[in-house]
Image (cartoon, rainbow, N blue to C red):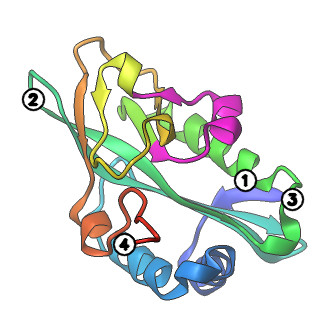
Amino acid sequence: MRIRRETEADRAAADEVNVRAFSSEGPTIGRLLSALRAMPPSECDLALVAEEDGVIVGSTLCTRSLLDAPRRLVDVAVLSPLAVAPEHHGQGIGSALVRAAIEELSRTSVPLLFLEGDPAFYSRLGFVAGGPLGFRKPSLRTPDEAFQVVKLPAYADWMTGTLVYAREFWDNDCVGLRDPQA
């Protein structure tokens, strides 16, 4: 398996992996991916794929959002979505994609990488709950334990505050969890 930057030629295959991985949210994830890729470029942007025998089996995107810190707004990255083809689950592909994203963003001026996800999985990769570190989640629908962050080398102690997701996440209703009973 090889982790590398996504190319224009990879997009259809990467999108297919996402749609399959998020089968219950297929149309929504497709719209979100299109919207995120159409955002103005920033240093926070990173699209990676996992390739095995010439086939895309995993994908992740990091895109720009904002931290509403006391001193000023700070550009931060959000890792979402992370997808692995269902038949390749449990092979370390998702972990490898996340580690590669952290490594690449660590060589930039991006100070923080946020996500919403399972702490049992992401804590093994260096993510910690954001709340105890002075970060406020962007939505009440985001479970406290799912709101996670990794501090990157460009982080400074004054960088605390509220994560403000890029509009593309809100426009596609991809922030927090929806109550299935509602």
- Packing grade of label 2 (10 A; few <14, some 14-19, many >=20) is few
State which mark lies toward you, 3 or 2: 2
Reading the image, the residue beneath label 3 is 1
Front in this rendered view, residue 101 or 116: 116
Asked which secondary structure carries label 2, the reply is loop
Asked which secondary structure carries label 1, the reply is helix
**Which numbered disc, 3 or 2, marks the residue that appears first in the sequence?**
3
Reading the image, the residue beneath label 4 is 182
Residue 72: mark in rendering: 2
Location of residue 153 by image quarter: top left
Q: Mark 4 touching mark 2, by CB under 8 A?
A: no
**Which numbered disc, 3 or 1, marks the residue that appears first in the sequence?**
3
- Packing grade of label 4 (10 A; few <14, some 14-19, many >=20) is few
The span from disc 3 to disc 4 (Cα, nearest Å) is: 42 Å
Q: Which residues are magenta?
A: 115-130
Q: Name which residue type carries label 2.
A: Arg
Q: Name which residue type carries label 3.
A: Met
Q: Is residue 118 magenta?
A: yes
State which mark lies toward you, 3 or 1: 1
Q: Is residue 165 above or below residue 25?
A: above
Q: Name which residue type carries label 1.
A: Gly
